[in-house]
Structure formats: C-alpha cells, structure tokens
C-alpha cells in the first residue's frame, strides 16, 4: 500500500518538527486537477476535513494565505471586506509558487518562502483534526487545527461558499 511510503522532509515538515507539532503523514496518488476531492477519496476522510492552502493577493498585489475547507470556495468579496482590503483574488500559479516556494498542488501554509498573513475559515478551527498539504503533491499531514493559529498566527475569517 502506497500509504506507508516515506516522504522526504519538506520545509513544512521541518517547521512542524522544529516546533514539536505532532502530525500524521498521508501519501496518496496525486491527480492533476483532482483537488481535495481526490485526496479525501483516496485517504477515506471527509473532504470538509481536508484544508486547501490558497495563495491570494490583495489590490496592491500583496500575497496572503487563505485556508479553506476542501468542499468550499472562498468568497473573495467577503474576505476582502473582513481583512480591510478593496479586493482579493487568487494569484497566478507561477506567482503563488514564487511567494510560497511550493508547486501548486503541493502548497503548504507551513514553511513558506515568504512570510505572509494567514487567514483561516473559522469553522476549520472547530474540527478535531485537519488534513493539510505537507509541502508536496500527493502528501498531506494531519494535525490539530490549533497549529494554524498557534504556529502560523492565522486570523479566523468567515468567507466560505459551499461548493456544488
């Protein structure tokens, strides 16, 4: 079973270990454009518990990180209003990669190349355990959501739109 494959260290796992954050490792077969639905299906976990890491930018092209339930989208209007910006939009993949240091599809909020403000959908913090990218495609780490606020200083926001 591929679930037991050892994954080499990433900047994300190095940061988690350095701060003594307990986490589980979950390997799955990365599928282009499969998103959180694919990883949730392969790992047998609710897609709502899989958290996607989105690199966005405000009207001044300042990058920020948004952590959202896998089965939801971000209301950029609501997000912009809550964080005091005129507008927020997703970065182009190559720009997101430059800011985070990670390949799109493998972006983790931990160990990013640039320090960026982090915003988390408030209900993510109510989950018992979340599955979030560990810094490479096909690799999620599971941990208590408290690490998002404790380690990343994530600010809770309410900007989820239910997909589908």
Image (cartoon, rainbow, N blue to C red):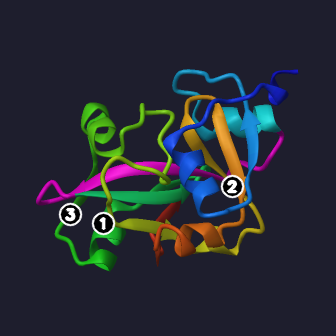
**Residue 104 percent across, percent down from the top left:** 42, 33
Residue ID at (62%, 40%): 36
Residue beneath disc 3:
87
- For this rendering, which residue is in front, 108 or 30? 108
**Residue 50 percent across, percent down from the top left:** 66, 50
| Residue 48 image label | 2
Left or right: 39 in relation to 54: right
Residue 72 drawn above or below residue 128: above
Q: Which residues are magenta?
A: 44-62
Which comes before the other along the chain, label 2 or label 3? Answer: 2
Residue ID at (67%, 62%): 21
Tell me whether the residue at label 2 lies in contact with that at label 3, contact meaning CB atoms closer than 8 angstroms. no
Which comes before the other along the chain, label 1 or label 2? Answer: 2
* Residue 52, magenta (yes or no): yes
| Residue 30 image label | none
**Residue 82 percent across, percent down from the top left:** 33, 78
Which comes before the other along the chain, label 1 or label 3? Answer: 1
Residue 48 drawn above or below residue 77: above
């Amino acid at each position: 079973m591929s679930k037991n494959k050892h994954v080499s260290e990433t900047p994300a796992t190095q940061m988690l270990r350095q701060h003594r954050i307990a986490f589980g490792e979950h390997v799955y077969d990365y599928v282009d454009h499969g998103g959180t639905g694919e990883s949730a299906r392969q790992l047998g976990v609710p897609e709502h518990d899989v958290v996607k890491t989105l690199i966005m930018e405000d009207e001044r092209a300042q990058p920020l990180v948004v952590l959202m339930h896998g089965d939801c989208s971000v209301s950029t209007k609501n997000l912009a209003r809550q964080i005091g910006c005129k507008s927020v939009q997703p970065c182009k993949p190559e720009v997101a990669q430059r800011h985070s240091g990670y390949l799109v599809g493998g972006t983790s909020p931990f160990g990013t190349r640039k320090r960026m403000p982090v915003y988390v959908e408030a209900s993510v913090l109510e989950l018992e355990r979340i599955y979030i990218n560990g810094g490479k495609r096909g690799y999620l780490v599971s941990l208590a959501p408290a690490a998002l606020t404790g380690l990343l200083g994530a600010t809770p926001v309410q900007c989820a739109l239910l997909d589908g």
